Image (cartoon, rainbow, N blue to C red):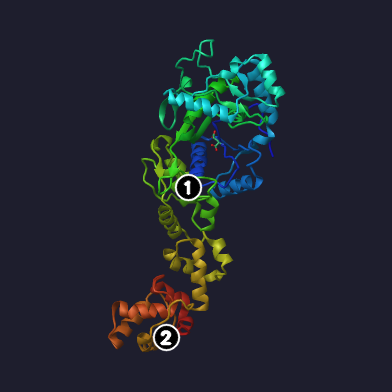
Amino acid sequence: MPEASDTPPFMIPTVRFAPSPTGYIHIGNARTALFNWLFCLKNGGRFILRFDDTDVERSKQIYSDAIAEDLAWLGIVPDETIYQSKRTKSHDASVSRLKEAGLLYPCYETPEELERRRKILLTRRLPPVYGREALKLSDAQKQAFEAEGRRPHWRFLLPNHDGDPFETKRTEVTFDDIIRGPQTVDLASMSDPVLVRADGSYLYTLPSVADDIATGVSHVIRGDDHITNTGAQIALFEALGGKPPVFGHHNLLINATGEGLSKRKGALSIGALRKAGYEPMAVASLAVLIGTSRNVEAVASMDRLAEEFEPSAASKSAARFDPAELATLSRALVHEKTASDVDKILEEIGVSRNKKEEFWNCVRGNLDTVADAAEWWAIIRDGPDTSERVGEGDLEFVRTAFDLLPDGQFDQTTWRSWTGLVKEQTGRKGRALFMPLRIALTGRTSGPELSDLLPLLGREETLARRP
Ligand code: GLU
């Protein structure tokens, strides 16, 4: 695994996608990954896949592997892959720096104590912001806690005061968000973030900033649930001597009932969409274009999607994701594919070499997924399965019709001339004529154009389907 370089190439726009490997990624996470990837393609940048795996309990290698595989399937190829869990030394150095600057202080409150204080503030109609009580502890009090076995967690002292941390004042952090435009966060409205837990492990905030600095991240593009974090993180960038990157916060996706998508619930995971046979570019198109001022359409290639990508086209409110839309987009892409695009799959399902093109052109318009072609190849090769049979009342008609099949080589015109003759001889027309024939030929009530199917079957195979 390559280590993040210590001399970041600042000149190249550098982005990172930073999932916590605590579950499988879903289409909402893919949106974040793709916003970064498309930004990168458009600006000739570098893409880092960074696993935010500081939560050792919940982070699992199987999830990291699955995430990398899902990204590859979508067409995202990271320039570098980093695991935060392997960068602890660098995070420790950042902690020392903050401690030396007096910007990281030990706190001994239990979660219950904090909750009690929060409730008191709320009943007094005050904002539930941490009051920095730990800063008032004397050395003796701290030692007493330690003697009791309590270990401190550590908070970052936000720069929202003029020297007296108990006299906070409105402190606006402003940034020009490449998606949402100018943003302001007031550092006096938030609690000093906990950076290090009592067991010494890191919460997300510090490793993220330390790694962004170390790896030369120039643009942080992520969900808009991080906007407040960004205020605190900009202060942290400055405290650690780093230049804050440019930020972009995109709207999140919600499901049909208005809930956010959850990695833990496995909702609409990319792996599940892949297994269901959806086209990767359909997933990518929807993940990117939904909730923007652009039309949602199936864009066939990542380069074209990158050309169309405009971060500021994303709307500010959450976007509702409808899986049915995915099916429509995916189908559209399948129908546009050529036989050579799907050659590998045709090979796998055993389509004879000389029939690949004819077969694909015949069936593609009826497929939901490329894999569904297998079913049609089986019908063409082995005859109809038993799903639909010619009805009793149609048997005589179908037999007569088969007896009228023309001699010689079948081509595109055969269906027309054959059914013309059948109509003349039997008096049947329209659906009453073609549906029993379709069922006899394919065992299905819908499917490819029969004028395309007949030459593919050939005379002998067609005759073999006479009931
Ligand atoms: N691991 C964080 C998350 O999944 C990353 C946020 C960020 O991009 O900074 O929310």
Q: Quadrant of residue 57?
A: top right
Residue placed most toward the observer, 315 or 146: 146
Position above or below: 412 against 126:
below
Q: Residue at x 31, y 77 (%)?
A: 431
Mark 1 element type: helix
Earlier sequence position, callout 1 versus callout 2:
1
Front tag of 1 and 2? 1
Of residues 352 and 195, the one drawn nearer to the viewer in this rendering: 195
Up/down of 36 relative to 24, above or below: above
Counting other residues with Cα less than 10 Å from the Cα at mark 2, is it few (<14), some (14-19), or many (20 or more)?
Answer: few
Where residue 371 appears, as percent x and y from the top left, is 52, 63
The image position of residue 403, as x and y in percent, is 39, 89
Name the residue beneath numbered marker 2.
407
The percent coordinates of residue 362 (x first, y second) are 44, 68
Q: Quadrant of the N terminus?
A: top right
Image quadrant where one finds the C terminus: bottom left
Distance of label 1 from label 2 (alpha carbons): 49 Å
> Relative to the observer, which residue lies in front, 389 or 381?
389
Q: Which residue is mark 1?
A: 284
Is residue 9 at all visible to an observer of this figure?
no
Give the quarter the ligand 1 occupies: top right
Helix, strand or loop at mark 2:
loop
Q: Residue furthest right?
A: 147
**Does residue 316 appear in the picture of this structure?**
yes
Looking at the image, is 288 positioned above or below residue 120?
A: below
Mark 1 crowd level (few <14, some 14–19, many ≥20, 10 Å Cα): many
Q: Residue at x 30, y 87 (%)?
A: 426
Q: Which amino acid type is marked by label 1? A: Ala
- Position of 133 with respect to 441 (left or right) is right
Q: Position of residue 184 (x, y in %)?
A: 43, 23
Q: Which mark is residue 322?
A: none
The three-letter code of the residue at mark 2 reads: Asp
